[in-house]
Image (tube, helix red, strand yellow):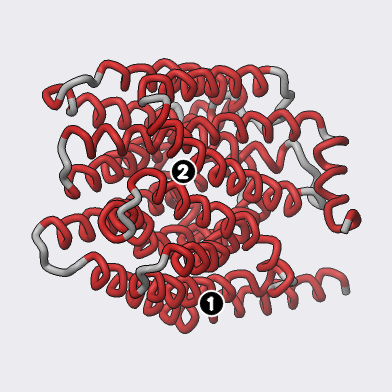
Amino acid sequence: MNSKFKPYIDLVRGNPNYRRLWLAQIIANFGDWFGILAIYSLIHEYSGSELLLGLIIVVKMLSLASFSPIAGYVTDRFNRRSLMIWCDIFRGVVVLGFILITTVELLWLAYVLIALQMAFAAVFEPAKTSSIPNVTSADELVVANILSAASWSIIFTTGMAVGGFATAWLGTDMVFMINGFTYMLSAWFIYRAVIPQVKMSKRELYRTRNPLTGIREGMQYLYSNKHILRPTMAKGAFTMCLGALVYMLIIVAEEVLMMGSIGLGILYAARGVGTGIGPVLGRRIFKKESGWVRGMGFFMISAGLMYIVVGASKSIYVMVLFVMLAHMASGSNWVMSTVLLQRRAPDNFRGRVFSLEWLLFTLAQSVSVTVAALILEFGLLTIRETMILFSLLLIVAGVFWLFKVAPKEDQYNIDSEKLAIESAV
């Protein structure tokens, strides 16, 4: 058992810069998930509207999407370590603003604050993900990403579970204060890290001084390199349906399980556990990186099948099990697509590649959640029927991926092997 954990222990012990970046991620993520239920609680308390609850998720995603193109340009052009520190500081200040929401008339402020919080996250996330290859060796990269995903899932699980109880027992104000402190602590760990970065040449800096030029070059680069475009699309293709399914867990906890924030904390904890276990098992099933893109199609189908069971069930025990299984698949998809992008995208384009990936991801999730919220708000389908609908659509997306996207990746691998043989000769 110890030998299985040894690569992860060695990475954390022997690589202080990754360790500090990793600790910053853990602390900030805990604050995020610890605080999100308090935001949901505010919306539900003052409105009771399923549409407004869905809208907070949509605003969150659209803010990420709106700032993603410029965020990628910024993270390639400027020092990523400094950007992450300032983003943490500003996010810590923004979340304290939720304390000001004390009446239904001030509910609009929640949408403004979540938009600001996500604007800074749009810069932080590609900067962080782009930095991981720069603080790890090629051999450490997969281990580092699996550890990051596993840590995210553990923090997600504990943060959501503790957040559910904290919101009920401590109140939303105290939760937001703790959330703000976690961002400040995260900034301190990043400040202590040394994060190398390949800087743009003076010629490139001058050529891309206009942000629109830099953004356009990033899009052109991605479109011209289909082997990078394919893993860039993976998260968006997955969340096109999964986003709505995760959103509907909020309503399932309220209306089916009748357990409120505690029920949601339990379901989201199951999601977190699955996300952590999935990448480890997924790597054992698809041992070669050449098979990862094809594996993404199987993961979509698997997650769709699991959520059909969730939608049809009334038992929290069955829901917990199958939510966990569904997110084992989504966690594998997340880590594999991230590693492929980190390996394939050069450092001076990596920020723009990851920001465009976020753009696709957030747009897909926003559309998904909006459609589901409208269906439920106007009573077109029941919560169970809507969950089964989006589960079936996820299965269809997986089948499409297997027959349309995966064959092109197979051809790319064949061509790469031929080129390697010719170069060796």
Q: Is residue 388 above or below residue 261?
A: below
**Residue at 42% across, 20% down:** 174
Foreground of the two, 35 or 238: 35
Q: Residue at x 79, y 50 (%)?
A: 138
Q: Position of residue 385 (x, y in %)?
A: 24, 73
x, y percent for residue 295: 59, 74
Q: Amino acid at mark 2?
A: Ser
Q: Nearer the viewer, residue 316 or 189?
A: 316
Q: Is residue 365 visible?
A: no
Residue 395: x and y, percent?
Answer: 40, 77
Secondary structure of residue under mark 2: helix
- Where is residue 387 shown, x and y percent of the image? 30, 68
Residue 322 relative to residue 216: left or right? right
Q: Is residue 421 rendered to the left or right of residue 337?
A: right
Front: mark 1 or 2: 1
Name the residue that disc number 1 marks.
Answer: 298
Say few, some or many: other residues with alpha carbon within 10 Å of mark 1 (under 14 / 14 to 19 / 20 or more).
some
Residue linked to disc 2? 355
Q: Quadrant of the N terminus?
A: bottom right
Residue at (14, 27) in percent of width and height? 104
Q: Amino acid at mark 1?
A: Phe
Quadrant of residue 191 within the rendered picture: top right
Distance from the alpha carbon under mark 1 to that under mark 2: 25 Å
Nearest the eye: 17 or 100: 100
